[in-house]
Image (cartoon, rainbow, N blue to C red):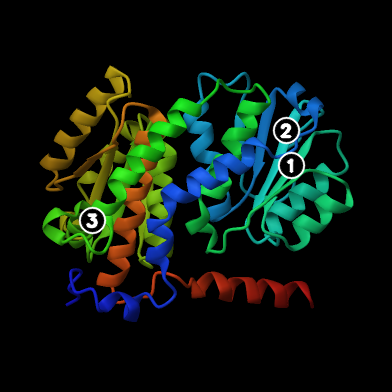
Amino acid sequence: MVDLDDLSIYAKLDPSGMRVHLREMPTQCVRAWEKALTFPLPADYALADKVLVLGMGGSAIGGDLVAGLVRGEARGPMITHRGYGLPPFADSRTLVVASSYSGATEETLSGFQEALDRPCPKLAITTGGPLLSLAQEHELPVFQIDYKAPPRAALSYSLMPLLATLYRLGFVPDPSRAVDEMVAVLEGLAPALAEGSPTERNPAKQLALRLRGRMVVIYGAGFLSSVARRWKTQVNENAKGWAFNESLPELNHNAVVGYSYPTNAPQHVAVVMLLSDLLNQPIRLRYEVTEELLRKSGVEPEVISGQGRRALSQMMSLVLIGDYTSYYLALLNGVDPYPVPPVDYLKRRLAEGSSR
């Protein structure tokens, strides 16, 4: 049994210091935002009426979060493309953003290389690797990340530059006040979630203890749908656990019918519902009815609300709570949250296959 309040366990179970990256999220956001505000961009990029983000895993989630945040106020659609190649709609009015922390993500490189043969404006967000080399070779703008971490722990450097770029190109309204509020909210929240905060006052430790030993399913709606995806992938990668995410209202048309079987599911499944008072009334009513249906099936959902007044604050406060919860869940599982051996194995096998 791991005691999350025993500070001596952290160096042992987290030797690479994932906890340091979690504590640094507010600072990461500020630095990435300020750097992106002065990052040189070609003037004609402002003509784009669509945004296409190429990315996978931790490098793609920033695109999802921004897309959910600006939906309804952006002047055109914003889409995250996870996979090989480039969608056929990418044209001279489509800003293509290749987001790859390592700069070596196979799928992202595939799409970026296709984009080189099209007239679309292009931008890369990376630390280096082949993506940096390709962009520099073709004299394309590169936002170079200077923060060392696993991609999932450098979320701020895929999210904030993207939001700043859209603002500077006139694609979305000025989010500066929202950014200021978000930083203040995260700075206020982070100490309560950190390892030095005892379980009795630490909501992330408490939630991790309740989730331990269960398959986790995360629900979200609207701009919180991508946050639910973030929670899912953090449980996968940090805690090395099974997790899935669903979105309202879609899940009300299918998932709720599946609560009956298997009959022992309530003993093995935990449902986390991410909530915001900014969601419209019909959606909030759906949350209430979905909670009722879960309870009737024997599942007591965990309802977690975002903090702050604006959507960005609520979104990122929930991200931080989820990141810390998955971190503590990793320690409860007795695993190092930092490495991802199955991903490394898969990349090696793919490299072997492509060399034959």
The amino acid pointed to by label 2 is: Leu
Q: Secondary structure at mark 2?
A: strand
The image quarter in which residue 77 lies:
top right
Q: Earlier in the sequence, mark 2 or mark 3?
A: 2
Q: Amino acid at mark 1?
A: Leu
Q: Are marks 1 and 2 in contact (CB under 8 Å)?
A: yes
Q: Earlier in the sequence, mark 1 or mark 2?
A: 2
Residue 88 in the image: state x and y as whole percent: 76, 35
Q: Position of residue 70 (x, y in %)?
A: 51, 26
Spatial separation of the CA atoms under disc 1 and disc 2: 8 Å
Residue toward you, 124 or 232? 124
Along the horizontal axis of the image, is 316 left or right of 332? right
How many numbered tags mark residues here?
3
Residue at (33% x, 59% y) in the render: 326
| Residue, disc 2 | 95
Query: Which residue in the protein does label 3 denote?
Result: 269
Which residue in the rendered view is the most extreme toward the bottom?
12
Question: At which x and y percent is residue 100?
Answer: 65, 54
